[in-house]
Every structure is written in structure tokens, then in C-alpha cells.
Image (tube, grey):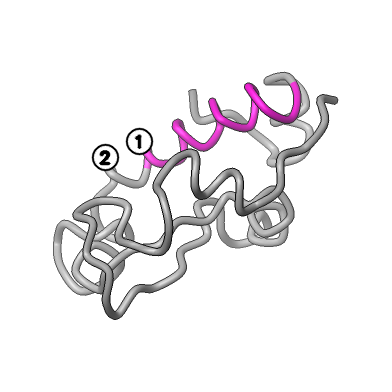
């Protein structure tokens, strides 16, 4: 596997500092693990978390918890970033159990 970037580098590369990854709102931000459930610890380990405002996190039909398209797009972006920075698609599948690409 490739050398890991740290979480701060990942976050800044994709989204900048703590603001909603969808709309850019900077207040009342929630931390969202892109891969949750049994993969939450892996999301944490590899920095695969994003920040979202309540509207885009869990307080509307457009929120990542209810919007399957947004959830899938975010998972695919995170998986591509993992492959570019940490390892191969096989490494990703071994760690996360499957691919979303």
C-alpha cells in the first residue's frame, strides 16, 4: 500500500477547512463518516469523513442520510481518493468489504 496522507491533508484537499462539503456553510457543522456501521472505524482511520450542515446531514430530504445519490457520490469520491493516496481497489475492498465504483 501507498504511504498514507494524514486526515488533515485529506480534508483540506477535498473540501477545505470545516465547512459543509455540499453548500459551504460554516456554522453548526456535523462530522459525517462516509463509510459507517462496521466500516466507521476504517473511515476514521483513513480520514474518510466530511463535514455537513444539518440540512445536508440529516435534517432534509436532500441530506446524505436520505439522499441515496449524494451518499453514493460521496462514497465513490472517497474510494477514488483512497485508491489515489493509500492503495489499490483490491486494498479498498479488503478493508471496506466491497467497492462502490
**Residue 44: x %, y % from top left:** 67, 59
| Residue segment shown in magenta | 72-87
Asked whether 80 or 5 is in front, the reply is 5
Q: Using residue 85 as the reference point, say whether residue 11 is left or right of it.
A: left
What residue occupies the far bottom of the structure in this picture? 28
The reply to whether discs 1 and 2 touch (Cβ–Cβ < 8 Å) is yes
Q: Using residue 70 as the reference point, say whether residue 74 is left or right of it.
A: right
Q: Is residue 83 magenta?
A: yes
Q: In which quarter of the image is the N terminus?
A: top right
Asked whether 74 or 14 is in front, the reply is 14
Q: Residue at x 23, y 62 (%)?
A: 56
**Residue 51: x %, y % from top left:** 40, 62
Q: Name the quadrant containing residue 25.
A: bottom left
Q: Which residue is drawn at 74% across and 55% down?
A: 45
Instruction: State the CA–CA distance, disc 1 to disc 2.
Output: 6 Å
Question: Given this view, does label 1 or label 2 mark the residue nearer the observer?
Answer: 1
Which is the main secondary structure of the residues drawn in magenta?
helix
Residue where numbered disc 1 is placed: 73
Q: Residues within 10 Å of mark 2 (few under 14, many from 20)?
A: few
- Find residue 26 and name its label: none
In the rendered image of this protein, does residue 92 appear above or below residue 18? above
Q: Using residue 92 as the reference point, say whether residue 75 is left or right of it.
A: left
Q: Does the magenta stretch include residue 8?
A: no
Residue where numbered disc 2 is placed: 69
Q: Name the quadrant containing residue 95.
A: top right
Q: Residue at x 66, y 54 (%)?
A: 39
Amino acid at each position: 500500500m501507498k504511504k498514507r496522507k494524514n486526515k488533515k491533508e485529506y480534508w483540506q484537499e477535498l473540501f477545505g477547512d470545516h465547512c459543509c462539503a455540499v453548500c459551504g456553510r460554516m456554522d453548526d457543522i456535523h462530522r459525517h463518516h462516509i463509510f459507517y456501521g462496521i466500516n466507521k472505524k476504517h473511515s476514521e482511520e483513513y480520514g474518510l469523513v466530511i463535514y455537513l450542515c444539518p440540512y445536508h446531514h440529516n435534517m432534509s430530504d436532500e441530506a446524505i442520510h436520505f439522499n441515496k445519490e449524494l451518499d453514493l457520490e460521496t462514497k465513490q469520491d472517497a474510494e477514488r481518493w483512497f485508491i489515489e493516496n493509500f492503495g489499490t481497489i483490491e486494498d479498498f475492498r479488503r478493508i471496506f468489504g466491497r467497492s462502490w465504483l
